[in-house]
Image (cartoon, rainbow, N blue to C red):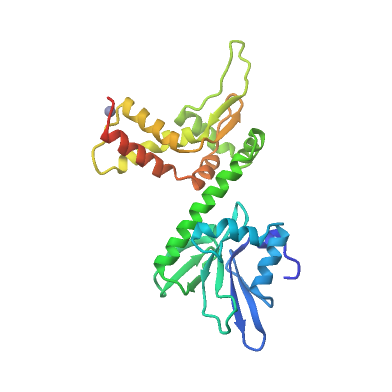
């Protein structure tokens, strides 16, 4: 790898400091297709090169994201809102000053387990990497990074104007889901008296919450009232807790499953609904 390309970086599942006898310090890269590559280059210089490519400052990154994981000198690498690498200790340095941390792309971590000990991560591409931190510490760090990722993406989302938002969400659009959505969720366009279509605002979050409310109610251990008043109160409470995601649609146009999945990935809709269900259940207005 002489010239780093965006495409290549986007395929990295993890990269770890790695010493090779007779060669010295290098970086072992695990790609999301399961392949690996050993690079004769220091870890810090490798990170600096990626940061330069994205025109981001590592110093600012540490200052801004270090506190999120409770570490002053160690921060997740956030090259873009969609490219976040989590630092996890992978070795005890042979010489003091050698890097001890490897970086794991958050969205490429499939599972975390206690075996092999102390903790192992299964990455996209089926490479299982054993690290040098406890299972609890790794889970806590992943949790903190996932929460940071949601904040970053929410901030990113807020900078979009409605046209960009529309473009962004609709670039995931697939026609096959259109009919199903339209029937199941009653998502319709608006028509005026002359039958001329016009643009309409829709909050994707509203569709999601209404759609997932029943799942949450089905999972409740206690019997929870499902009357109209209670359901509406639950949906309203949950929606007040969630950032709206508006899109502009034309009459008859609707959202693909991918749109909704994309939103769901970043926002904890289920937690907001569960919270709302509990509040309404304890204090029903019916
Ligand atoms: Zn009720």
Where residue 19 appears, as percent x and y from the top left, is: 61, 82
Place of residue 236 in the rendered image (x, y in percent of width and height, measured from the top left): 41, 30
Left or right side of 72 for 42: right
Q: Quadrant of the C terminus?
A: top left
**Residue displayed at 65% across by 35% down:** 161
Residue at image point 62% right, 88% down: 21
Front residue of 148 and 61: 61
In the orientation shown, which residue stands out farthest toward the top? Answer: 193
Residue 96: image location, x then y, percent:
57, 82
The residue at the far left in this view is: 223
Residue 127 seen anywhere in this rendered image of the structure:
no
Q: Quadrant of the N terminus?
A: bottom right
> Where is residue 5 shown, x and y percent of the image?
72, 62
Give the quadrant of residue 253. top right
**Any part of residue 244 in sight:** yes
Q: Residue furthest right?
A: 3
Q: Quadrant of ligand 1?
A: top left
200, above or below 234, in the image? above
122 to 92, vertically: above or below: above
235 vs 116: above or below: above
Along the line of sight, the residue nearer the viewer: 148 or 183: 148
Q: Choose top left, top right, bottom left or bottom right for residue 268.
A: top left
Q: As rendered, which of 70 and 48 lies closer to the eye?
A: 70
Residue beneath the point at 52% across and 49% down: 150
- Please tell me how many numbered marks the rendered image carries: 0
């Amino acid at each position: 790898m002489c010239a780093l390309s965006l495409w290549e970086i986007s395929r990295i599942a993890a990269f770890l400091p790695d010493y090779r006898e007779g060669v010295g310090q290098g970086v072992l890269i695990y790609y999301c297709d399961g392949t690996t590559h050993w690079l004769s280059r220091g870890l810090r210089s490798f990170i600096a090169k990626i940061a330069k490519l994205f025109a981001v400052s590592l110093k600012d990154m540490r200052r801004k994201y270090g506190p999120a994981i409770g570490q002053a000198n160690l921060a997740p690498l956030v090259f873009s809102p969609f490219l976040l690498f989590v630092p996890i200790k992978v070795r005890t340095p042979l010489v003091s000053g050698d890097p001890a941390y490897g970086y794991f792309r958050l969205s490429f971590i499939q599972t975390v387990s206690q075996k092999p000990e102390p903790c192992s991560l299964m990455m996209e591409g089926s490479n299982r990497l054993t690290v040098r931190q406890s299972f609890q510490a790794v889970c806590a760090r992943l949790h903190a990074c996932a929460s940071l990722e949601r904040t970053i993406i929410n901030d990113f989302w807020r900078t979009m104007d409605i046209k960009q938002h529309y473009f962004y969400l609709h670039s995931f659009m697939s026609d096959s889901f259109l009919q199903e959505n339209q029937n199941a969720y009653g998502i319709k366009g608006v028509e005026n008296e002359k039958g001329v279509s016009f643009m309409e605002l829709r909050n994707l979050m509203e569709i999601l919450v209404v759609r997932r409310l029943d799942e949450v109610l089905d999972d409740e251990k206690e019997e929870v009232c499902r009357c109209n008043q209670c359901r509406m109160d639950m949906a309203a409470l949950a929606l007040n807790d969630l950032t709206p995601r508006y899109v502009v649609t034309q009459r008859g146009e609707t959202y693909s499953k991918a749109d909704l999945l994309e939103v769901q990935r970043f926002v904890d809709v289920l937690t907001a609904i569960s919270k709302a269900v509990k509040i309404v259940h304890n204090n029903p207005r019916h």
